Amino acid sequence: MDRQKIELPDIPGIVLTEKQEYDITQVIATMRLSGFPMDGEEIKNLMLLASGAKTAEERIKELDKKYGDG
């Protein structure tokens, strides 16, 4: 099996714990294995959520604005 190390982008001002980094890389790997690779912007948003720099409510509002709320 070809193992690839998942590198997280550097976001100025965002510091993650080792557990947060591990959890994020697990999400990225799971999405890849499921056929839904995450792009850089999605990974950054995941990191912002994990760090507390962005709330889930803020992210939902951004997605509603981008895609419409139905």
Image (spheres, rainbow, N blue to C red):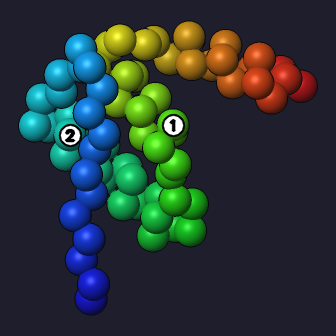
Q: Image point 69% across, 24% down: which residue?
A: 63
Q: Residues within 10 Å of mark 2 (few under 14, many from 20)?
A: some
Q: Residue furthest right?
A: 70
* Residue with the mark numbered 2: 21
Dot placed on the residue nearer the N-terminal end, 2 or 1: 2
Image quadrant where residue 54 sits: top left
Determine whether 51 is above or below 28 in the image. above
Q: Secondary structure at mark 1?
A: helix
Identified at 50% across, 51% down, the residue is 38
Q: What numbered label is drawn on residue 16? A: none
**Front residue of 15 and 59:** 15
**Image quadrant in which you'd find residue 12:** top left
Residue at image mark 1: 41
> x%, y% of residue 52?
32, 13
Instruction: Give how far across and how far down residue 26 sits, in percent.
Output: 30, 53
SS at mark 2 in the image = helix
Q: Position of residue 23 (x, y in %)?
A: 25, 43
Alpha-carbon span between mark 2 and mark 1: 16 Å
Q: Is residue 43 above or below residue 5?
A: above
The N terminus lies in quadrant:
bottom left
Task: Tell which tag, 2 or 1, sits nearer the viewer.
Answer: 1
- In-image side of 56 versus 14 (left or right): right
Asked whether the residues under the numbered discs 2 and 1 touch, taking CB atoms below 8 Å apart as contact, a structural biologist would say no
Amino acid type assigned to the residue bearing label 1 in the image: Glu
Label 1, residues with CA under 10 Å away: few <14, some 14-19, many ≥20 = few
Please determine whether, in this image, residue 37 is positioned above or below residue 59: below
Residue 55, given in percent of the width and then of the height, sits at 45, 12
Q: Determine the image quadrant of residue 19.
A: top left
| Residue under the image location 52 percent in, 59 percent down | 37
Which amino acid, mark 2?
Glu
